[in-house]
Amino acid sequence: MSVPLHHTVDGPDGAPLLVLGPSLGTTGAIWQPQLDSLARRFRVVRYDHRGHGRSPAPPGPYRLEDFGQDLLALLDTLGADRVALAGVSLGGAVAAWVAGHAPDRVERLALLATSPRFGTPGLWADRAAAVRAGGTAAIADTVVGRWFTPGFTARHAAVTAWTRQQLATTPAEPYAACCEALAEADLTPALPAVTAPTLVLAGAEDPVSPPEHARQLAAALPDATVEVVPDAAHLLNVEQPEPVSRILLDFFGDGAGYDR
């Protein structure tokens, strides 16, 4: 059963809708670096996944399908038949699931730091166990170390702390249930059904979803292009906000054909 996702809406009334999904362990706030640029042209909707931020945290287990149904329910709440979607990491996987299972709802699609499969089941089982034992704070330093390049972390301590705080305040059990959902998640069967033109963005130094994963995604999609952002790891939209914002604006264009 879907849950009502907490979301925020920015941008001019009547502008085309652009819906943005966050990564595992973050909230819709993770798109703050793009908000000023995107909200000049679009009605920007940022949401929190189930178990994150201010969205409900139903008992597990969770599956990727549950996240996708949550997002479809949000589109219904917004009265949106057809929108542009973008997501980073888990948010990208959810956006791809929706675009593959409800292709008529997605006009254009951007997948950032997204893989057909994220890691191995054993990796996610270990992380879920660690979180259940010590909370999300127990894994925060290790996870954030994959989100950014070492140079960025050294230069931008405040931004790094801001993202770490989002992770460390995510409740343990919902986060663990998300890990178990990702252990089983495989986007491969859904990708050929995606009809939306798709942009796949990768950070050149991303250890989680490296550029080769972006190329695998694009190869399985009917209409996709790949761009690799230099000097960026997993949260490339935070580490390289201006290039990512520019690439997204170029890709989404003027929003013709999106719901308003």
Image (spheres, rainbow, N blue to C red):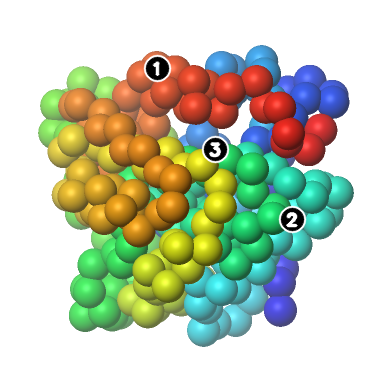
Query: Is residue 246 positioned above or below 186 on the image?
Result: above
Q: Quadrant of residue 4?
A: bottom right
Report the amino acid beneath label 1: Glu
Alpha-carbon distance for marks 2 and 1?
28 Å
In this rendering, the label closer to the viewer, 3 or 2? 2
Residue 25: mark in rendering:
none
Judging from the image, what secondary structure is the residue with disc 2 in? Answer: helix
User: Residue placed at 24% from the left, 67% from the top?
Assistant: 119
Q: Are marks 1 and 3 in contact (CB under 8 Å)?
A: no
Alpha-carbon distance for marks 3 and 2?
17 Å
User: Residue placed at 86% from the left, 49% from the top?
Assistant: 79
Which badge, 3 or 2, is on the more N-terminal residue? 3
Query: Is residue 220 positioned above or below 254 on the image?
Result: below
Q: Quadrant of residue 125?
A: bottom left
Report the amino acid beneath label 3: Ala
Which badge, 1 or 3, is on the more N-terminal residue? 3
Query: Is residue 228 positioned above or below 36 on the image?
Result: below
Quadrant (top left/top right/bottom left/bottom right) for the C terminus? top right
Task: Count neighbours of disc 3 (C-alpha within 10 A) and say few if under 14, some if 14 to 19, many if 20 or more.
Answer: many
Q: Nearer the viewer, residue 29 or 107?
A: 107
Which badge, 2 or 1, is on the more N-terminal residue? 2
Res 98 visible? yes
Where is residue 182? Give x, y as percent. 38, 71
Where is residue 163? Give x, y as percent. 39, 40
Seen as rendered, the residue at the extreme front is 222
Tell me the residue that label 1 is attached to: 242
Tell me the residue that label 2 is attached to: 74
Tell me the residue that label 3 is attached to: 29
Where is residue 172? Give x, y as percent. 44, 69
